[in-house]
Amino acid sequence: MPAAPHRPRGAPSAPGWVASGAAAVAAGAAAVAGALPRGGTLPRATWELRHRLLVRLLLVGAAAVAVQAAWTTSPAWATAAGRTAWDAGSTRVALLLIAAVGVPLALAAVASARWARLPRARAEQLRAGCATTGIVVCAVLAPVLSGGAFEAHLLLYVAVPLIALHETWAPYLAAASTALVSHAAWVLVPVVAGHGAADPHRGAVGDGLVHAGLLSLALVGAVVAWKVAEAARAAADGKVAELRHRARHDALTGLLDRRGAALALDAALSPAEEPRGAPGADRTRPLALVLFDLDGFKDVNDSLGHSAGDELLTRVASVLRRAAAATDRATDRATDRAADRAADRAADRAAAAVTTARLGGDEFAALLPGAGAEQAVALAHLVAHGLRAGVRVAGVSVEQRVSAGVVAHPGGSALDAAGRAGLAEELLRRADVALCAAKAAGDDVVVHDGELDERAARRTGLARDLRTALERDDQLLLHFQPQVGLVGEDAGRVVGVEALVRWQHPQRGLLLPGDFLEAVAACGAEHRLTEEVVRLALVQVGRWADAGCAVPVAVNASRHCLVRPGFVPLVAAALAEQRVAPSLLRVEITEDDVAEDPHLALLAITELRAMGVGVSVDDFGTGYSSLAHLRRLPVEEVKLDRSFVAGLGVPAPAGHADEVLVESVIALAHRLGVRVVAEGVERPEEAAVLRQLGCDVVQGRLVAPPTAAGPLPPLVTRRGGSRTAVATTPTSAPTGAVHVA
């Protein structure tokens, strides 16, 4: 058995050498590929412009070659060259030249055609290859037809940078190969008798090497210029892309901004890119749009600072991104079950990509191309659940609520740019209507339907009519509901009335506040309405005072009025105009008004109290504030909402919790020197429990419903201590009316 060949220790085995060599070759190939231009990166418009230029140059070259060929094969040329025009050699040359003339003309024809039936990439390769090869052929034929003139040789070097203008590898390599092969053949195997030296083959190899070297340098130089241009274009494209990204994305969250969302919506409403005549080529895909709005976002800014507000917005964006990704995955699974072909699945997955945006402030949006209302609602619930689970902001866990409005578009016929813009605006309007409905109802998600549009149309019409009503004196009126004392010397006495606005609409009849307050907010008339209500209330108080009945009147201040700089001067001017004592006016505010801007609210309340105007906190316990506000605010009265009163007088355990809560609020308010009014009292049992708990005043239908004031209204207590009896135990007699003795 022969001994195994000796191998030095540490030397790699044959397979190791092979692997090392392959790795070195791969690394070298990768380095070369990285040094070479990629190709195919020209913008389409630029490519077409350059191609048209090359085709025109090819046509000029083909015409020049045809003229030269005609001259070369003519008797005049033969006489000038000292040859016989129709000898065998001249005939072969003539036939060769005539055939060569047809080549650039044929290539020019192919390069000029559009080839619409071919895929665009293949058509471009064919057109570019024919144009560049034709230019090289013309450059090669020029020295042949000119008898080897030195200037004609230079045409090939001029053609080298031209064939690189397409910046595409296949046409460039085809043209470069044609130039090298044809030029070498022309040098080594002369076809024109008498070309060059007396002996045509003398020094042919040397001349061929020189020509090949110079031509190779020119070809390499063209590639280097190509690479430099490609790198510069890539850098410019990167800058443009960065600027475009900044122009279309929100700097804080990285989501699309309002402009970017508008462009994405326009793209989603554009027809699918299908071949002409294919199904769906002239129709738009269905889509769904979701608008989100954070509830109470201002509270975060006010309590934790604006940096915490920005941090919350970034957390919301993260939750929205995760929900969008989860929706994409769910859509992918559904698509995989429904689609049979891989192409269909890829197209559906591309269409289902969710686009997220921050439209401004605390308003976000999600666009779901190819989806319906069901997927959009699922996405909205994911976002709501993710935020309600708690997000950490400034080291604090915040349970953020969010409202969402959803609108779905079923798709349809293709639209032009103006039609898409109008449809996009309409979809945004519908989603915003649904969002407003969700916020008003306290729901997480509301899907737009026709009823919401009808309500919005009614609200818009009422807002228009309300502007007219505020300019007239015969449509807005007040109804008054008495407030009766329960304990102490005021027990059974009317201690005040609340003015409740009504609108005598010329077509719709008498409207209650719940019917038109949305319209008030829609047209921004809160301050103007409050001004009119204060004026009407003080006019009536003045009439009662003139009739010998001085009773305080409570007026509800519309939302946002309390923190408006002109509110306190408005009240002062109205009191002065009607010559009513400030003690006869009480302004009712809500906890939400205080929470909107606690500092401005405190200033306004302090100024009102300094004037002698009373201030009452309406619907106490239903807003976003806490009992701490009651300690800081110089109010004289709080009004318990009907939701706390309704459970009183109900057998335990159902009514026990409400009774404990009401007792605690009354005790705390009394310790702070604040009077308590229970509103919405409808049953004698409720009044009896309130009296036992020490509630100061009651108001509701048990006492009297709101009614219009007459010349000498029976609702008020005359001076002299007339009293009003209020039943606090069930009787067979009718209750609910106030009788003045």
Image (spheres, rainbow, N blue to C red):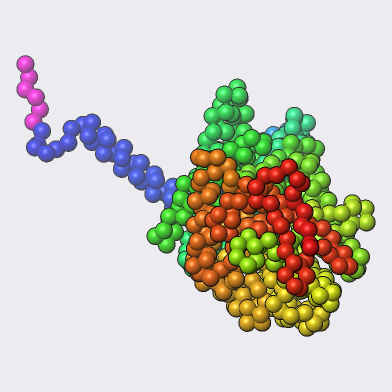
Q: Is residue 701 above or below residue 297?
A: above
Viewed as shown, does residue 475 lie left or right of 190?
right
Q: Main secondary structure of the magenta part?
A: loop
How far across and down, in percent of the image, does residue 167 sit? Answer: 58, 51
Q: Which residues are magenta?
A: 1-6
At 60% from the left and 71% from the top, the residue drawn is 636
Q: Is residue 61 visible?
A: no
Q: How many marks?
A: 0
How far across and down, in percent of the image, does residue 689 sit? Answer: 58, 51
How far across and down, in percent of the image, does residue 264 sit? Answer: 66, 49
What quarter of the picture does the N terminus occupy?
A: top left
Viewed as shown, does residue 579 lie left or right of 260?
right
What quarter of the picture does the C terminus occupy?
A: bottom right
How far across and down, in percent of the image, does residue 400 sit? Answer: 52, 53
Residue 494 in which image quadrant = bottom right
Viewed as shown, does residue 246 lie left or right of 518?
left
At 72% from the left and 75% from the top, the residue drawn is 584
